[in-house]
Structures are given as structure tokens and as C-alpha cells.
């Protein structure tokens, strides 16, 4: 945050990451999670669902790693802007809910203040990461290559054992936690600052590794699901998902181009999450997709889902540009006080 010039290749990655988040929500949040009966009755459909999840589940990890790649430099004005954005979209989504139902939404204050445990989990963990970032940056700047590598090995080793294989800690389970976000953040800082050997592969190799890991992940989950196992492979802290996200990000880091349009869209990428995952609106996004899967032929279902995702994405970006117009005079006041 706060970079004067933006690298369009990584801003494109930000856009793609948010689209992947929308897709994984469509395939893994909205739709029922296939069990052994579903695998036996509809193997092709289930395989395609797992294939979609395998290549899109990395969206959250990539979004966090992007912050680590550049390093979060907390400023009061940036934190205020994020809080303003949350408040703005909270009000907008409540207005949409009222327009649809004709009734005043329930739990208004709870949702605006993010007091509902299931509301915007990502935002709350990211806020904690944002506030703690100076400590992580201080370590990243002071640690030697060897020290950094050992700390990363320890963090990921602990997380794999206690937060993934055995799920022995609620505060690490599945990667929905600040420690998991810290690990991803530091991994990205390590790659950017020290450039270990695996960051120097060709872009085509990075892309092939992403595709290959996703394919292996699909096959592994499909086989294990015959025994109602394998869901843990899709956790955000799964080492397979982390590796897949890492090579996907490294591929984009080696692209070179400049685009004002890409930068303009990417600046509002978070808004897409704030609409389709809002506690008032997520039920419409998920419910529509669930209804379509029961009513439509497969190809038509895919076309409808793509149309919905693109429509929600574009609408969210445009709404956020209105938010920016409202924020600009407030930002000017912050900037005057900082001088």
C-alpha cells in the first residue's frame, strides 16, 4: 500500500486473485461439498468441481502474499481509508438488501463493526496483519538470508503439523488465522528480498509448476474423496496450496508491461470481496449459483456463472470508484495534517 508507481504485472495478479476468490466461492462455498456418494454417482461433475477448486483456491493466499511482496507500510491515512471503505460498502450492501426485501436489515451495528464472527473473516485477519506489519518488516530487514530461511522453515513446519495434518490448534486450523497470514507475508518478503533459487526459474516453468501442482491436487482429492477424505488438501495453509500460490505469483512477477487500465481496476479489487462476501449479499450470490446448478445444463450453468462473476466484479469496481470520489476530500484533510 502507498506505492507511488504500481507494477501492472502485479496489479493484474491482484485482479486475477480476486476473480479466483469469486470462483472458489462459487464452486466450494455455494455448491455442496461432494461426498463419496456424489463421487460414485457423478464422477465427471465432481472431478470438474475439484479441478476448479484446485486452480482457484490459491486466491486468498496470493492476495496476502502480494502484501508481503511489497511490504505493508502502515499509515494512519491508509488505515482510515480501509475503514472508510468497509463502512461505505457496509452501508451500500444494507441498502441493496433493503431494496430487495423491502425490510430494514437486521444486526446493522454488528455488521458495520464486523462483530459477527462469520462476517468478513478475511478483512479482520488482514487488519490484524496490517497493524502488525512493522514488526514483520523489521525482522525481514534485519535477518540474514540464513536466519530468514530457518524462521520460515520453523513457522511452516509448525503450521503443517499443528494446523494442517493434525488440526491440533483451533487458531491455526485451515489457514483462517493471523499466524497463517504472517507466514504467507514473510514467505513473500523472503522471496522478494533474498531471491532464492526457486524464484529464478523461467516464467514458463513457474506456470507449468502451478498447472502441474493443481492437477496433482485435483487427482489426490478426487481419489481421497471416495473415502470422504481429502478436504484438508484445500485448506489455505495446505503446503500444496501455498506452493501453488507461490509459483503462480512468481509467474506474474516476471511479466513486464504497463497499463493504466489494469492499475485503475486493481486499485478497487478489494471492493469485489466486500460485495459478494458481505453477510447480506453472499446469500444471493451463493443461492443463485446453487439454484442454477440444479436447474441448468452444465454448459449453460458455466456460462451463467461466468456472466454473474464478471457482472458482480465490474459493478463492485464501479461502486468503489464512487467511494473514492467521496474519500478524496477526506484524504486531503489527512494529508494536510501529516505535513
Image (cartoon, grey):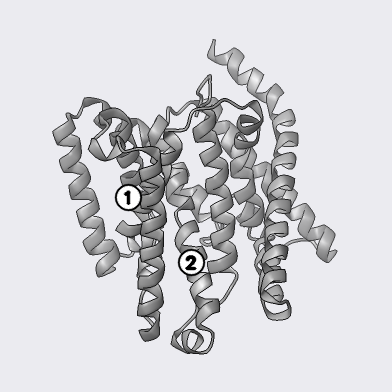
Where is residue 296? Give x, y as percent: 73, 76
Residue drawn at (38%, 54%) of the image = 177
Image mark for residue 51 = 2
Residue drawn at (47%, 44%) of the image = 63
Q: Is residue 231 left or right of residue 23?
A: left
Residue 275 in view: yes
> What residue is disc 1 on?
179
Residue drawn at (19%, 47%) of the image = 153
Q: Nearer the viewer, mark 2 or mark 1?
A: 2
| Quadrant where the image shows the C terminus | top right
Q: Observer-nearest residue: 51 or 233?
A: 51
Q: CA distance from mark 2 to mark 1?
A: 28 Å
Where is residue 161? Give x, y as percent: 21, 63
Height in image: 103 above or below 224?
above
Total marks drawn?
2
Q: Observer-nearest residue: 113 or 130?
A: 130
Element marked by disc 1:
helix
Q: Observer-nearest residue: 179 or 306?
A: 306
State which tag comes first along the sequence, 2 or 1.
Answer: 2
In terms of image quadrants, where is residue 140? top left
Residue 236 in view: no
In terms of image quadrants, where is residue 187? top left
Amino acid at each position: 500500500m502507498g506505492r507511488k508507481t504500481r507494477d501492472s504485472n502485479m496489479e493484474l495478479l491482484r485482479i486475477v486473485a480476486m476473480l479466483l476468490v469469486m470462483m472458489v466461492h462459487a464452486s466450494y462455498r455455494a455448491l455442496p461439498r461432494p461426498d463419496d456418494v456424489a463421487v460414485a454417482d457423478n464422477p465427471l461433475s465432481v472431478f470438474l468441481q475439484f479441478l476448479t477448486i484446485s486452480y482457484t483456491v490459491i486466491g486468498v493466499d496470493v492476495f496476502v502474499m502480494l502484501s508481503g511482496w511489497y511490504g505493508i507500510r502502515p499509515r494512519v491515512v491508509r488505515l482510515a481509508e480501509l475503514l472508510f471503505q468497509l463502512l461505505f460498502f457496509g452501508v451500500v450492501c444494507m441498502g441493496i438488501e433493503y431494496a430487495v426485501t423491502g425490510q430494514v436489515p437486521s444486526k446493522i451495528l454488528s455488521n458495520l463493526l464486523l462483530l459477527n464472527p462469520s462476517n468478513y473473516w478475511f478483512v479482520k485477519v488482514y487488519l490484524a496483519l496490517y497493524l502488525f506489519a512493522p514488526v514483520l518488516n523489521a525482522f525481514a530487514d534485519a535477518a540474514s538470508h540464513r536466519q530468514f530461511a530457518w524462521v520460515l522453515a520453523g513457522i511452516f513446519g509448525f503450521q503443517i503439523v499443528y494446523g494442517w495434518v493434525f488440526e491440533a490448534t483451533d487458531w491455526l486450523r485451515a489457514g483462517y488465522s493471523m499466524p497463517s497470514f504472517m507466514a504467507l507475508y514473510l514467505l513473500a518478503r523472503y522471496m522478494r528480498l533474498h531471491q532464492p533459487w526457486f524464484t529464478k526459474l523461467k516464467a514458463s516453468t513457474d506456470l507449468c509448476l502451478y498447472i502441474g501442482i493443481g492437477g496433482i491436487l485435483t487427482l489426490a482429492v478426487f481419489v481421497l474423496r471416495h473415502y470422504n477424505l481429502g478436504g484438508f488438501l484445500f485448506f489455505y495453509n495446505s503446503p500444496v496450496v501455498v506452493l501453488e500460490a507461490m509459483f503462480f505469483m512468481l509467474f506474474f512477477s516476471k511479466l513486464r508491461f504497463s497499463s493504466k487500465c489494469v492499475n485503475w481496476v486493481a486499485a478497487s479489487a478489494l471492493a469485489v470481496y466486500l460485495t459478494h462476501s458481505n453477510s447480506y449479499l453472499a446469500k444471493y450470490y451463493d443461492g443463485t449459483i446453487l439454484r442454477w446448478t440444479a436447474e441448468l445444463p452444465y454448459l449453460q450453468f458455466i456460462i451463467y456463472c461466468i456472466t454473474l462473476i464478471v457482472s458482480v466484479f465490474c459493478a463492485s469496481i464501479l461502486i468503489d470508484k464512487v467511494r473514492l470520489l467521496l474519500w478524496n476530500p477526506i484524504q486531503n484533510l489527512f494529508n494536510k495534517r501529516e505535513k
